[in-house]
Image (cartoon, rainbow, N blue to C red):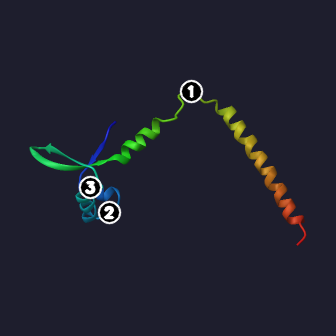
């Protein structure tokens, strides 16, 4: 599980928030933070968990089997034609219905 670390300013820019709002969320505990030493200086980073969730979703439920595009297209075209016929019938009923 990989996490993406952002500074307060980066987080504010990414989510279109003011820096003040992000600091308030950090202080209230709504945002998970960690401290790391960068260039000999301890800095605080926000753990952006939305990146982890989206990466997990990319791999969940994705079939690695090859796709037969011709068969898939034909199935979609068949479903489209069925829906189109139903739509035309509904339009005909609506136009011929007594008012």
- Name the element at disc 3: loop
First in residue order: circle 3 vs circle 1: 3
Residue 50 in the figure: left or right of residue 19: right
Identify which residue is drawn at 70% across, 41% down. Answer: 76
First in residue order: circle 3 vs circle 2: 2
Residue 57 in the figure: left or right of residue 23: right
In this view, 50 is above or below 58:
below
In this view, 46 is above or below 12:
above
In front: label 3 or label 2: 3
Q: Which mark is residue 17?
A: 2
In front: label 3 or label 1: 3
Residue 91 position, x and y percent, is: 82, 60
- Name the element at disc 1: loop
Tell me the CA gap for discs 3 and 2. Answer: 17 Å
Q: Which residue is mark 1?
A: 65
Q: Which residue is mark 3?
A: 29
Residue 64 position, x and y percent, is: 53, 28
Residue 10 in the figure: left or right of residue 91: left
Identify which residue is drawn at 11% across, 44% down. Answer: 39
């Amino acid at each position: 599980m990989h996490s993406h670390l952002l500074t307060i300013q980066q987080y504010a820019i990414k989510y279109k928030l003011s820096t003040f709002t992000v600091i308030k969320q950090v202080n209230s505990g709504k945002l998970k933070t960690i401290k790391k030493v960068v260039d000999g200086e301890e800095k605080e980073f926000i753990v952006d968990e939305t990146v982890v969730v989206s990466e997990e979703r990319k791999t969940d439920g994705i079939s690695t089997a090859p796709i037969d595009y011709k068969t898939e297209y034909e199935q979609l075209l068949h479903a489209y034609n069925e829906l189109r016929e139903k739509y035309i019938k509904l339009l005909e009923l609506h136009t011929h219905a007594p008012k």
